[in-house]
Structure formats: C-alpha cells, structure tokens
Amino acid sequence: MQRTAFGKLSDGQTADLYTLTNRHGMEVVITNFGATVVSLKVPDHVGKTADVVLGYADLDGYVNDKASLGVIVGRYGNRIAKGKFSLDGKEYVLAKNNGENHLHGGLKGFNKYLWQARDISTGASQSLELTRVSTDGEEGYPGNLTVKVVYSLMEDRNELRIDYNATTDKETVLNLTNHSYFNLAGQGTGDILQHRLTLWADRFTPVDSTLIPTGELRSVKGTPFDFLKEEAIGSRIDQDDEQLKFGSGYDHNFVLATAVRPQPELAARAFDPQSGRVLEIRTTQPGVQFYTGNFLDGTIHGKEGKVYGRRYAFCLETQHFPDSPNHPSFPSTVLKPGQEFKSTTTYAFSTR
C-alpha cells in the first residue's frame, strides 16, 4: 500500500491518499478525509483500465463537495423527516439541510472529518482501517460513537470489500454507507442510461414529494422499479410515474430484506455493454438506495477536468431504510451501549 500527501486542511492537518493494488490490474485510491474512495480503476473486456468512480482531482474538491462523491456517509445516511426523531421519549433535533429534512448526517457529516488511518494488510488483501469518534451531540445526535471502516482490496480477485463497525456509550441511531458514484464506461464519459441493471428487490419504499418514505413497502411488479430481470437504466426513467417525478428519476430505497443478514448476499448487478465491465454488489444490509445522478448538473469539475452532467453516474448505497427512526415498522437503526453495529458490502468487478 502506497501513502502520499493529498493536501492541507484549514486547521493545518494533512490529508493523505492510500493506493491499494492487486495482481489483477485493480487499483483503489482512498483518502482519510471523509474515508473517501477517490479513484477505482478496473480493466474492461480487452484489458484496458479506466477509473469508474466520480471524484475530485484535489483535496479542495472534497472540502467543498456537496454531492458526497465516494464518501462514507454518517451518522445517518439518507433522510430523516423534518430533522427530528425520538429515543426513549426524548426528542432530538437535527439540522435541516435538505429542504425541511435532514440529509447524510447534517451540515458537517462524517465526510468532512479527517479519519485515523492504519494499514492492516495481509497476504489475502491490501486493507486500510479508518476510525473516528463522533462525539455526543455532534450534529444533534446522542452518544459518543466510535466508528471503524475497513476497505480491503482482495488479492485473488477484483473485489473491494467494506466492513463497518460501530459502538456507542448512549442509545443513538446509525445508518452508515459509502456514496460512490459509478460509471462503468469510465468517469466523465457520458450518461449511464444504457447501463443494464439487475436489482434483487421485489419491493421498494415509495416517497412523498420531499423524498421521505411514506411507510409503505410497495411491490415493484408492473412498475418502472422492477429490475428483477436485467433492464437498461434509462428504459423507463422518464415515464409518467409519480415516484419518478418526485425523484427526478430513480432516487429510492429498494427492499432487499426486512432484517440484517449474517453474510453478504447478492443485491445488484450492473453491466456496461460498451466496456463489458460488470459490477456485482453483495451486502448484509436490508436496503439499497438506487440513485441515478439526477441532480448532477454540469457544475462539478472532477478528475482530469471532466465535467459531471445529469445522470453521468449511478449510486447503489447499501443501507438501512431512509427515515427509519420515524418508522417503527422498518428495520431498526437504533444502537445501544453494549451492542456492536457490523455490516459488510462487497463490490466485485468482472467483464463479459
């Protein structure tokens, strides 16, 4: 694993880049600022390597980032309605940074902090452990939360594994995810509407006009949300459908299970016919947020000077459901003292 300086923050601290490589031609670059995936290079069907995630060329890009490119999102990924939830009869008030709602941890989420990094590589993988303590009251959340995220690039196959772990000293809520934006043809090369997607979810959580779940678990059957069989991402994205209008495309949580699974199970497969690249995602989490970059608008200048336009990438954020603290019927996101939160998601790359 190679470590290089990435730049200085306003408080004088230095952020670093960590480059993980394997013998099959895969390379992952991570910064300890935001525990962020900066670059992910994999070969196509003729062996040509390209960077398949959106990102910035320098640290300033991530300091000023508002799109959460490649970051670890926390303390609560996705939305919490009206920035409020209750635990043990006590109401907690969070920042409203997405209209009337709370999004991705608030005004200063986990992606705006420098994490402690440690190389824990073995013969089987190059592994980077990143840790931080989110203090009691940070962004309105209760409890001192100790979070550990381990990125592992497997040596024997082109697979990136992310293991999440957290403990708290006071009852709190937690929803951790990675927010990488993928374009399997290569970052900044155009839209992802011809990518083909399979999503092993027979239900999704419909939302209101502010993208807060209504509480319903709706069947995907007969809707534009049915990806149980491989379908082009763009084939139905502009249909006259209320849910698609609310999200300006896909920006919805898909139900993989109604509880955490002990081992990662197949959740999604994306395929780019142009490059032949295939991405398979497995997770222990009960949900995955499928987002089609609808709010990318060409104002972001990324790596190699590339401009990121609308729908130039997709996200598949493995997670618990949005607004779970306000929906007792959803899988619980409550973490109590003495408990340990654990989850695993894997991203396996191949070609066809």
Image: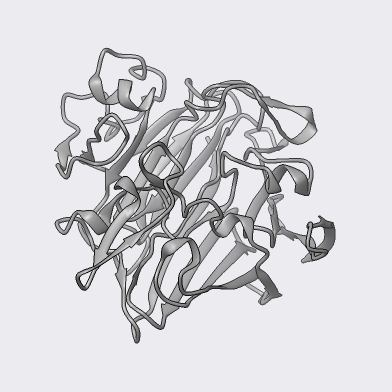
Q: Quadrant of residue 245?
A: top left
Identify whether 35 is placed above or below 169.
above
Seen at 40% across and 52% down, the residue is: 318
Q: Relative to the observer, which residue lies in front, 307 or 23?
A: 307
Seen at 26% across and 55% down, the residue is: 324
Relative image position of residue 41 (x, y in whole percent): 69, 44
Relative image position of residue 259 (x, y in whole percent): 23, 62
Q: Quadrant of residue 262?
A: bottom left
Q: Relative to the observer, which residue lies in front, 29 or 305?
A: 305
Q: Relative to the observer, which residue lies in front, 345 or 306?
A: 306
| Residue at the bottom extreme, as displayed | 338
Relative image position of residue 100 (x, y in whole percent): 36, 40
Q: Does residue 95 appear anywhere in the picture?
A: yes
Q: Does residue 125 appear anywhere in the picture?
A: no
Relative image position of residue 65 (x, y in whole percent): 64, 42
Identify whether 32 is placed above or below 45.
below
Seen at 78% across and 57% down, the residue is: 9
Q: Quadrant of the N terminus?
A: bottom right
Q: Seen in the image, is 139 located left or right of residue 333?
A: right
Colour scheme of the rendered structure: one colour
